[in-house]
Structures are given as C-alpha cells and as structure tokens.
Amino acid sequence: MTAVCAERASGSIGHRDHIPPIFVSHGAPASALDVASGTELAQWARELPRPRGILVVSAQWQANTLTRGSTASRPKLLYDFDGYDITGSAADLERVTYAAPGMPELAYELAALLPVDRAERGWDHGVWSPLSRMFPSADIPVLQLSLVAGAVPRRLFGLGRKIGVLAARGYLIVGSGGITHNVVELDPRRDAPPADWARAFDAWVANLLADAEIEELLAWRTKGPEPRRAHPTSKHLDPLFVVAGAASLYEHAVGFPIRGFEHGTLSRRCVQFGR
C-alpha cells in the first residue's frame, strides 16, 4: 500500500473516530475477473477498519431523485455493461455472484438524514465488481444510493456532507466510478500504455486531492486538462465529489492505495480519505 499523503484537510472529528470514506475506480467490467487487480483490492480492504455496513454511490445509477436501492436479504445483481465490448467474457461475468445482504437499518438512518426515495433496484457492477473482490466473504451488509441525474459537483459535494456522519457511526462510504473514463477511445489491450491526456487528468485530480484544493476540483469542467476527453460524461467522476464531501467533515490525510491505468483510458487510481 502506498504511503498516505501528509497533506491534511480541516475538519472537526479526528481520523481515529470514523471509518475513512473511499473512492474506487472500478474499471472495465472484465476487471471483475482479473486476479491481480482483485488481489490489490483485497489487500486494501484488509487495511481498512471493518465496517458495520457499506453505503455505495455508484456511477452506474443516476435517478431523477435521490433514491436508495434494495434492502432485501439478498439483492439481485445487475449485469449492466452498456458501452463495453465484453465479447469473450460475458458468460464469465454473469457467473459472478455477491451474496451480501441488504441493510434496512442503514436505509432508516439515511432517511433520517435527508429526503430519499426508495426502489427495489439491485446492485450494478459499480457495486458488486469492487465489493466482491474487497470483501469476498460477503458478510457485511450493503446499501446502494443513487446519484441524481444532472447534479452539479457542488450539489454532490453537499450531498456527501449530509451523509458523512455515517462514517462516524461505523459505516464505510464508497464512491465507485473512475478518475478518467473514456470508453470511445478505449484500447482493447488491458495493459495498453495510458494516453497522455489520461495521465495528465489523473495527476491533476491526485494533486488537488493531496493539497485539499476542493474548489478547483469542483470546477473540473473548466479547470482540468482536456476534461471532455477524460470524461465525455460526468457520471464516473460524480461519486468522487460525494465521497470528498463526506470526508470534509473529518480531519484526514489523503492516500492512493491503488494507481495505474487499464485499456489506455481508464485510471485505476483509488482514494482513501483518512487512515
């Protein structure tokens, strides 16, 4: 695991008093089958405090209103791979299972914090792909929370601040997306060298997070290097703003436990907001 950056963000609660919110770059769908990346995710998870439950905000679910997903004893999995060519791996992906339970208790706590609609939607690959590798025993309850379609970064950051108290109650808040995400220019080779623009945007985000320059990050559409190329749509970066908002309630260091790229255009950088 990489050393946690020394930069600190101001807050009111010390880092020992909450579970660090995290952002996972979940990668292309076939990443769920990759042994090496799975090993990295599992190692990272072992270094995190064990949570009582997990709240996931995934790039794969945008709703018209803020909505929480299924609280069933075993929510169904959605094999949603729009935009990707999964020829040759579709059957293997659809055999992936993740039998963690839903969490009604967390749904109640969430509803006490802010207005939230309900849906019995199952878990998309932004949930089951990283969690099945981070917590393969599937014994920690999970709840998914949607993004709101069209929400600007500042609103998403504000959402994170509203739910951030859950980290102090023993819940792991997870944003699942990607620091860069351009499927149109994706190289079919998983180990393709990263595009220059992808490296530049990834480094720009990392530097802002390390320096706690959140205002600059929220203005990524006008401030970032080649932003429309790094993110033709914003949805894979949006969960980062939610998690950053949650983390802003606490004093924390920012670390990058996983780095790198896949397919030339997809950053694998993951972020941990605290120790």
Image (cartoon, helix red, strand yellow):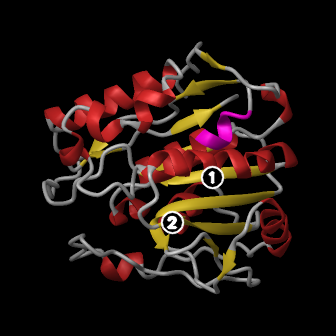
Where is residue 59? Give x, y as percent.
Answer: 45, 61
- Eyeballing the image, is 40 above or below 12? below
- On the image, which quarter does residue 198 sit in? top left
Give, as a single range, the part of the protein colored magenta. Answer: 245-249
Work out whether mark 2 precedes mark 1 in sequence or the reverse, and give the earlier one: 2
- Residue 120 is one of the magenta-drawn residues: no
Crowding at mark 2 (Cα within 10 Å: few <14, some 14-19, many 20+): some
Spatial CA span between label 2 and label 1: 10 Å
Residue 43 visible, this orientation = no
106 on left or right of 222: right
Which quadrant of the rendered structure holds the N terminus? top right
Q: Secondary structure at mark 1?
A: helix
Residue 16 visible, this orientation = yes
- On the image, which quarter does residue 113 sit in? bottom right
Q: Of the numbered discs in the image, which one, if any, rests on residue 148?
A: 2
Dominant SS of magenta comes to: helix
- Eyeballing the image, is 35 above or below 93? above
Q: Are marks 2 and 1 in contact (CB under 8 Å)?
A: yes
